[in-house]
Image (spheres, helix red, strand yellow):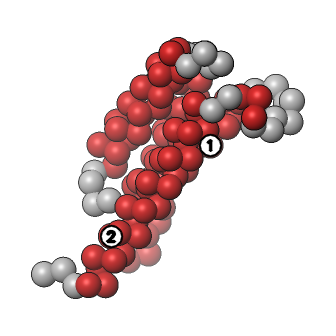
Amino acid sequence: MRTARSASMDRGKIAAVAIVLAMVVVGSLVSPSSMPTPGLAGWDKLQHAAAYFVLAVVSFYATETENYKITVVVFALGTCVELAQAFVPYRTASLLDAAANGFGVAVALCVVWCAQYVRDVRKM
């Protein structure tokens, strides 16, 4: 049976995923001229990887779904958002951006697996 406290914690987790998801999607579709860039080589790929890393980590901890399912969903979302950029006048779809999204998700999965491994070893 779920208590009021666990239900509110679930809403908090869902809200965290929704906020990060909204930030990633809006950030991916707004005009690039409205976002600050330091002019570093590869900066936009780092932004892609970091955004999808954060989205994946928050999603992993917000649900009880197996990590591989979250990985597939977040990667598919990144690919769909990248394809959507092809239809936005001031954006372009990029295979390298989609790869950076996937890289961020993969690194998040590795970090979460390592954290789970350490937690399990400490329980022994």
Q: Nearer the viewer, residue 89 or 17?
A: 89
Q: Can you tell which mark lies on residue 10?
A: 2
Query: Tag 2: residue type?
Result: Asp
**Residue shown at the point (75%, 35%) measured from the top left:** 34
**What is the secondary structure assignment of the residue under circle 1?**
helix
Q: Can you tell which mark lies on residue 50?
A: 1
**Residue shown at the point (47%, 28%) measured from the top left:** 81
Residue 97 image position (x, y, % from top left): 59, 23
Q: Nearer the viewer, residue 72 or 122?
A: 72
> Quadrant of the rendered structure where residue 45 is?
top right
Residue 49 visible, this orientation:
no
Residue farthest to the right, as pictured: 39
**Residue shown at the point (61%, 38%) measured from the top left:** 27
Residue 8 visible, this orientation:
yes
Query: Tag 1: residue type?
Result: Ala
Residue 65 image position (x, y, % from top left): 27, 54
* Quadrant of image for the N terminus: bottom left
Residue 31 image position (x, y, % from top left): 68, 28
